[in-house]
Image (cartoon, helix red, strand yellow):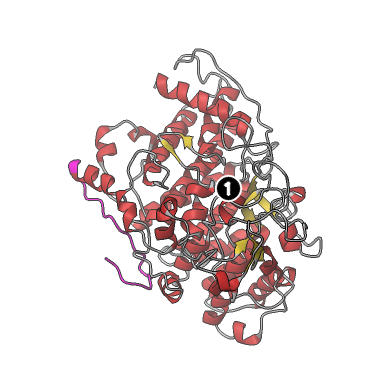
Amino acid sequence: MKRNIIFAALAVAGLMLSSCENDFNAKIYGSLSTTNFPSSESDYENYMMDCYVPYCIKWTYTLSSQTHNFYVPEGSIVRLLDGTSDYCAPWVLGGSWGDSWKKLTSGSFEDMKYYTRAYSGYPEDFGKTRDVTVMTKIIGVLENAPESKLSAAKKAQFLGEARLCRGLMMYYLMQYFGPVPVIVDPAKVGDEESEKNLTRPTLDAYTQYITDDFEFAANNVPEKQSQKGRYTADYARFCLMRHYLNEGYHMNGYYQKAADLFSKFTGGYKLYTDGTNPYADQFKIAHKFNCEVIMAVSCSTGATGTGTQGNFNPWSWYFVPKASKVDPNGNPTPFYYQGGGWGQCFNIDPQYYKTFEDGDLRRETILTSYYNTQNKLVGPSDIGNLWDGYIVNKYPIETATSFQGTDFPLARWADVLLLYAEALTRAGNSVNATAIDCVNQVRARAGLAKLTSDKTSSTSNFLDAILAERGHELMYEGCRKVDLIRFGKYYTTMKAYGRTPSSEYFPIPNYAIDQATAAGSTLDQYFYTSNYDGPTK
């Protein structure tokens, strides 16, 4: 116990300096033990803040073991939930360094069975199940805090934040692997028999774990926080709304619960509409935490992904091919402040680009040509030769710094409007005017006309229109594969793009299967939803 408390305090000290807006102040502790830490309200708060560590943007983090943060491109939701979707053409020009990227973007997940427990640069996320245990232990310490050291109000708040972080951890693991073995009862942390139980929980049971955490958070996290980037009740509501929709196909009443949440948001959000292209402008550094943002990871232009400079944004290094800073006439290109990237790991498949309607302002964040370092104009005819797909310029290069200060969005009002439209439609199994209006609001900000009557003529057609709108609006925000699975269209969509998925969710690594067998458990390597539109193993 003493060792774990010391570790938590030191991790928090790093987080306090590296958090979302640099508003947290570091507190360095000396000698700690179970008798002197946590011993005050601030100590319990600092201990709880360890739960935020996986959600900063650093190259890696260490909670139970070293691994990728959820929002760093190299191993994040962008790589695993966008790069494995219809957005991204396979990275065939990546060379040996890009072999794993090529396979993932091709829909080939079989090699993930061979990912090891040790950090090796691959996005091996199954080990994060142990992070759930760490968070459960922290939750237990908070629950047992005496009122003389932690008031009832603060205990509820800190528990709400910790449980929101744990719920998010389980939520993302669900999107990667399906239900996974986790410990959510603090009394079972350290219990040998509980930790040897490596069977998958039932889908309903695992869904309920997440629901319980998100619902508790929505009722106990503050409506506003003094520090930007620290989670709020509205962010909990957003996470809950999305979770209700994902699992509504097997959980009774979840669609209606998702719809009912819409009126519970308290932040007065609205779509950002300033500028000639408000969709593109909302992501720029000057417009951080604008009227549309419910939650974001705010990044610093001075951060490098290590140390205590804050969260960093290295997206452009993964989106941009070997491009020139200037055109043949010496005029600045969009890459003037950086030049070419490390490799175009992420791109927009030209087939997907064609799904945008003419005049869609969101399409302007995609570049269909560039000048390479030989000052050759590279265009669509060079796909598969000089680049793999079009350039995502949604998070633009704005400053002459190593990395950009562009925020990474976690929850926007546009997303809520589309979720609400979907929830109303699924709950009532019909199309109503309110749902149509929500979608049309998003389209209007993108410079598009209202949906045509054929798009709203049936529930099926309208849901297809919502899915298309979500793809265009939420491009590379880490949710495309989740959306395709929820709509029962992942396999057929990917197959149509020539990237037949090897499975619906990623396989659990062999080391975990072997460990379960040795412990007398049966851990299924693959998981499929009941509405999967492709073959199962």
Query: 95 and 51: which one is in front?
Result: 95
Numbered range of the magenta stretch: 518-537
Q: Is residue 519 magenta?
A: yes
Image check: 285 left or right of 312? right
Residue 442 falls in image quadrant: bottom right
The N terminus sits in image quarter: top left
Q: Position of residue 329 (x, y in %)?
A: 77, 60
- Residue positioned most to the right: 275
Q: Quadrant of residue 204?
A: bottom left
On the question of residue 273 being in view, the answer is: yes
Report which quarter residue 66 is drawn in. top left
Q: Which residue is located at x 50 percent, y 40 percent?
A: 54
Which residue has dot 1 on it? 218
Q: Mark 1 falls on what kind of element?
A: helix
Binning the other alpha carbons within 10 Å of mark 1 as few (below 14), some (14 to 19) or many (20 upward) gives many
Q: Nearer the viewer, residue 458 or 86?
A: 86
Q: Amino acid at mark 1?
A: Ala
Percent coordinates x, y for residue 122 in the rendering: 41, 47
Up/down of 68 relative to 535, above or below: above
Query: Which quarter of the figure is the C terminus placed in?
Result: bottom left
Q: Is residue 493 magenta?
A: no
Image x and y of residue 129, in percent: 38, 43
